[in-house]
Amino acid sequence: MSDLMSQRPTRIVVDLDVLGGNLRAIRAHVGVPVMAIVKANAYGHGLVPVAHHLQAQGVEQLGVAFVEEGMALRRAGITVPILVLGGILGRQVAQLIQHDLEITVSSLDKLRKVEAAAERLGRKAVIHLKIDTGMERIGVHSYSCAPMIEAAVASQWCEIKGVYSHLACADDPASKMTAQQLERFLDACAHFERIGAPMPIRHLANSGGVLHYPETWLDMVRPGIMLYGVLPDPAAHRTVDVKPALSLISQVVYFKTVPAGHPVGYGATWAPERDTHIVTVPIGYGDGYPRALSNCGEVLIRGRRRPIVGRLCMDQFMVDLGPDGSAYVEDDVVLIGTQDGETISVEDVARRAGTIGYEILTRLNERVPREYRSR
Ligand SMILES: *Cc1c(COP(=O)(O)O)cnc(C)c1O
C-alpha cells in the first residue's frame, strides 16, 4: 500500500503519545485493568500500530470484534491476551484456539462447539461467558444463564477467564437502563457463588460506563472510543481528560476563481453570489469522508474555518474561500484536528454529517495512509 500512496497529500496522523496518555488517564480514573478495544482497525487509527503501542504501554488485554482481527494481531507479534467479542460460528472455533484468542461463549450450544474443538486440538480454550442484560444482541439472558454457567464450570476443555455483558445506554449520563443492566449482571455473576465456583473477571463498562457509571467498573473495563479521545455521544460528559489522537489532513491541489452564478460540482447544487475563490481538496467519499458533508461540512485552511461547497465527489471536493480569501496549492487542509488554534473535532464532523463519531472514524479506509508520531 505505502509505495503507491506515499506521495499522497492526504493522510491520517495518529499521535501515539496522546493514545498512551488516554490509556493512563482511564487507568488512573477506574483503578482496574483495561481491555483496550481495537476493533474496526482500532477505530480507524490502524490496528497493528495501535496494538503495538498499547502493548508497549502495558495494557492488560485487547478486545476485537472478529477472529480475523485477532489473527492479524497475533501475526504481527502481539502477545497480550486478546478477546474476540463477537458471536462465533462453529467453523471459527479451531482458528480461535490455535491463535491463542479468547472466545466469547454466548450460549450452551456454542459452549459445546468450543469444547468439541478444544478436545480435538488437545488444547484448552480460554472463554468469557456473555450474558445479555438488555441489549438483545448476543448472550444468554441473565434470567436463564444458569445452565450455561454450570456447564462451563464443569467443562474439562474450557477455562472460564471472564464473564461479561454490554451496556445499551451508558452514553447517556441520565439513563435508568444502566442500573437495571448492572443488577441483572450481578445477579447472573452470583450464580458462580451459588454453585461454589470461583468468580471469573467480571467486565461490563464500555466508554459510557467508564465516563458515567463507576459501579459498572467491576474487575475490568472495556473502553473503545474514549481511548481515542472521542466521546461516545453528544450528551456524554468528559469526566476523564482524554484527548483526540487522530488528525485528518490534506493539501490544496487546485485554486481558481469562479464567477458569480457559475455552479460548482455534480448536480450544480451551489453557485457563488459573487466572484469567489475556490480550492479543490483531494479526498472524497471513496476515502470514507462522508458525502453527507456536501454543502454543509467545514475544513481549516490557514487557520480559518471554510465551507465545503457543492457535492462532495469520490476523490475530491471544493471549498469556498470567499472573494478575499487566499490559499496556495500545497497549503495544508485540516479536515479533523487543529490548525493555528482552530479545531474541528470528530464530534463536529459527525454532527454535520448526521451520524456519530464512531462511524466517522471507522469509515476512514485503507486508501488514506496513516502516519504515527511520538516523541
Ligand atoms: C465496541 C465494544 C466496546 C467498546 O465500546 P465503546 O463505546 O467504543 O467504548 C466494549 N464492549 C463491547 C462488547 C463492544 O462491542
Image: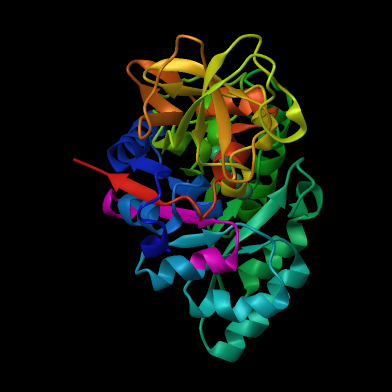
Number of marks in the rendered image = 0
Residue 80 lies in quadrant:
bottom left
Left or right: residue 284 versus residue 221 is: right
- For the N terminus, give its image quadrant: bottom left
Q: Position of residue 331 (x, y in %)?
A: 35, 30
> Is residue 168 or residue 252 the one in the foreground?
252
Q: Nearer the viewer, residue 48 or 236?
A: 48
- Colour basis: rainbow
Residue at left offset 75%, top offset 25%: 269
For residue 94, above or below residue 81 = below
Q: Where is residue 61 in the image (x, y as percent from the top left)?
A: 42, 54
Q: Can residue 4 be seen in this view?
A: yes
Residue 149: percent from left, percent from top: 68, 61
Q: Is residue 85 left or right of residue 332?
A: right
Q: Looking at the image, which residue is at 36% across and 52% down?
A: 7
Q: Considering only vertical position in the picture, is 272 above or below 241? A: above
Outermost residue to the front: 259
Quarter of the rendering containing residue 79: bottom left
Residue 64 part of the magenta-drawn span: yes
Q: Is residue 204 visible?
A: no
Q: Does the magenta stretch include residue 301?
A: no
Residue 114 occupies which quadrant of the picture? Answer: bottom right
Which residue is pictured at 48% across the width and 76% down the height?
A: 99
Q: Nearer the viewer, residue 261 or 34?
A: 261
Q: What stretch is highlighted in magenta?
A: 55-70
> What residue occupies the far left of the structure in this picture?
375
- Ligand 1 resides in the quarter of the picture at top right
Q: Quadrant of the C terminus?
A: top left
Image position, residue 134 (x, y; %): 77, 40
Q: In this view, does 123 lie above or below 28?
A: below
